[in-house]
Amino acid sequence: MSDLLTLVTEPWDACTLLDSGNGRKLERYGDVTVIRPEPQAMWAPSQDNWQADAEFVPASDEEGRGRWNASPKVPDSWPLSRGNVRFHASLTPFRHLGFFPDMAPQWDFARDQLSGVDAPAFLNLFGYTGVGTLQLADVGAECVHVDASKKSVEGARANAALSGMEDKPVRWLVEDAGKFAAREVRRGRRYDGIMLDPPKFGRGPKGERWQLEDDLAPLVRDCAQLLDDKSRFMILTVYAVRMSALAIGELVKQATAHLPGRVEMGEMAIREEARGLPLPTAIFARYVRN
């Protein structure tokens, strides 16, 4: 088992973690500042007088819904970018802003792995609004983007249009990730890179039920069957804090035992601008070809 790694997202133009503490975080997305709950911020903030354009107030249900108290100056959506990829940010009912900035090191890693490969095939499961997919399309990957939410896939298409990437070779699919992966295995398909960012709970387009603890292991095993000895990577990110990086690392290690390469695992975090503190956000495990 390899040593645990920490992948830290540094402040960038589209997203800056300004301060954190007392179970909350203060962020800036473009010109909009927001306050969101953050259980991992157990320390005291550097300042107490936070000012923001919007604050998320969580509800009591386990799915994480709530409401935003927002200034009239906050638009319904506004454009942000990372490199050549442009995308819409918005205040969603699930406290997110329409993308996950802590995925930036994973996007950069995946781009580096596939850059220079001739027409690499990339699969993005639970692809959400497509920022990761477009990052890989930008380096010439032929992408398959899968998400169970029609609204998310529509948002991904809108981000492709915003980026001027409508003509990139991307298949945008509203599908259940588990069913799709199993079908790809039966078809004998293979990919050069795979990214999985599954939620804790979810529903497929036909009401299929997703439960992370029950359904993750078979999905990872199926995804591993879509890799061969020339494939470059498989990235798994998990936001369920009850899981361990060591646990998902061993899952990926066993699933990819038939392949040459190694497995890396650890935590993902975002660097706080005020004091340089890394705020942990998720865990990850990834197979990397040697």
Image: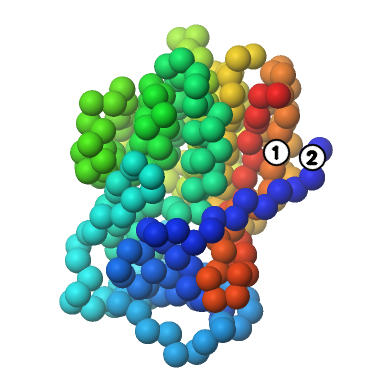
Q: Quarter of the image containing the C terminus?
A: top right
The disc label shown at residue 264, or none: 1
Task: Point out residue 128 in the picture as x, y percentages from the top left corner.
Answer: 37, 43
Quadrant assignment, res 227: top right
Q: Quarter of the image containing the N terminus?
A: top right
From this viewpoint, is residue 18 visible?
yes
Task: Point out residue 63 in the picture as x, y percentages from the top left corner.
Answer: 42, 59
From this viewpoint, is residue 93 visible?
no
- The amino acid beneath tag 1 is Glu
Which residue does the image show at 69% across and 18% down from the upper left? 259
Which residue does the image show at 31% across and 75% down from the upper left? 54
Which residue does the image show at 62% across and 69% down from the upper left? 277
**Residue 224 in the image: above or below residue 85:** above
- The amino acid beneath tag 2 is Ser
Colour setting: rainbow
Task: Point out residue 262 in the picture as x, y percentages from the top left corner.
Answer: 73, 29
Which residue does the image show at 71% across and 48% down from the upper left? 5
* Residue at the limit of the structure toward the top, as seen here: 188
Nearest the eye: 197 or 113: 113
**Contact between labelled residues 1 and 2, with CB atoms less than 8 Å apart:** yes
In this rendering, position of residue 155 left or right of residue 102: left
Please, what secondary structure does the residue beneath circle 2 have?
A: loop
The disc label shown at residue 210, or none: none
In this rendering, position of residue 269 left or right of residue 257: left
Q: Count the marks: how many?
A: 2
In this rendering, position of residue 251 left or right of residue 194: right
Residue under numbered circle 2? 2
Gap in angstroms between the C-alphas marked 2 and 1: 6 Å
